[in-house]
Image (cartoon, rainbow, N blue to C red):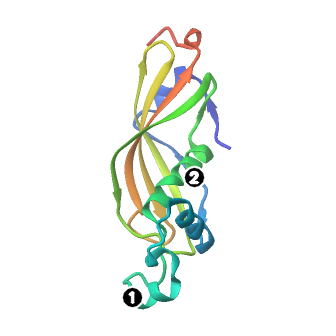
């Protein structure tokens, strides 16, 4: 579990890597479940024999959106939690790029750099993270993106200095 910080401490973290998650194994059962949930059964994801024979990947690969969706678990694992937070909201992504395929049976982990934190209204903090998903024993990341989230808190907890 990641550490806890106060709203006052957030600005001191801007420009720094705030967390690296634990490794997550991406196996064929996870890929198959994601295919079922999204109705994306392209053979490069769900047919190991055909993917080995017909693709350049040597076997099946995870959906890019599966890798992207793992960022939630990675974030929860390593990004500092804000004590005053009452709710977190996924606001969206800018510039998502799928850089390298995640082969079935590999492990991935997330790297989170806080690049912006600004207060919006009385009870919201908008944060932007540069995120990358590392593939174990690979040079290129699986993906890179800018992830925007909103931290909601009771307005009475807003620091006076901001």
Quarter of the picture holding the C terminus = top left
* Residue at the image position 40 percent from the left and 58 percent from the top: 143
Quarter of the picture holding the N terminus = top right
Report crowding for label 2: few under 14, some 14 to 19, many 20 or more residues within 10 A (C-alpha): many
Mark 1 vs mark 2: give the one in front: 1
Q: Secondary structure at mark 1?
A: helix
Quarter of the image for residue 54 reads: bottom left
* Residue at the image position 57 percent from the left and 20 percent from the top: 153
Find the distance from the CA under tag 1 to the CA under tag 2: 34 Å
In depth, the one of 121 and 83 nearer the eye is 121
In depth, the one of 50 and 152 nearer the eye is 50
Residue hosting label 1: 54
In depth, the one of 132 and 18 nearer the eye is 132
Question: How far across and how far down the image is residue 118, in percent?
Answer: 40, 23
User: Which residue is outermost to the right?
Assistant: 1
* Residue at the image position 47 percent from the left and 61 percent from the top: 134
């Amino acid at each position: 579990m990641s550490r806890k910080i106060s709203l006052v401490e957030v600005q001191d973290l801007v420009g720094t890597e705030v967390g690296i998650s634990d490794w997550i194994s991406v196996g064929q059962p996870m890929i198959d479940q994601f295919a079922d949930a999204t109705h994306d059964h392209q053979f490069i994801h769900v047919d190991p024999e055909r993917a080995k024979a017909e693709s350049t990947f040597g076997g099946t690969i995870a959906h890019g959106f599966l890798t992207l969706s793992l960022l939630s678990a990675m974030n929860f694992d390593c990004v500092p939690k804000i004590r005053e937070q009452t709710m977190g909201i996924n606001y969206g992504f800018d510039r998502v790029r799928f850089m390298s395929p995640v082969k079935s049976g590999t492990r991935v982990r997330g790297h989170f750099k806080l690049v912006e934190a600004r207060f919006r209204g009385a009870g919201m903090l908008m944060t932007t993270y540069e995120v990358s998903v590392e593939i174990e024993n690979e040079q290129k990341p699986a993906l890179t993106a800018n992830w925007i989230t909103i931290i909601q808190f009771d307005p009475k907890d807003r620091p006076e200095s901001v």
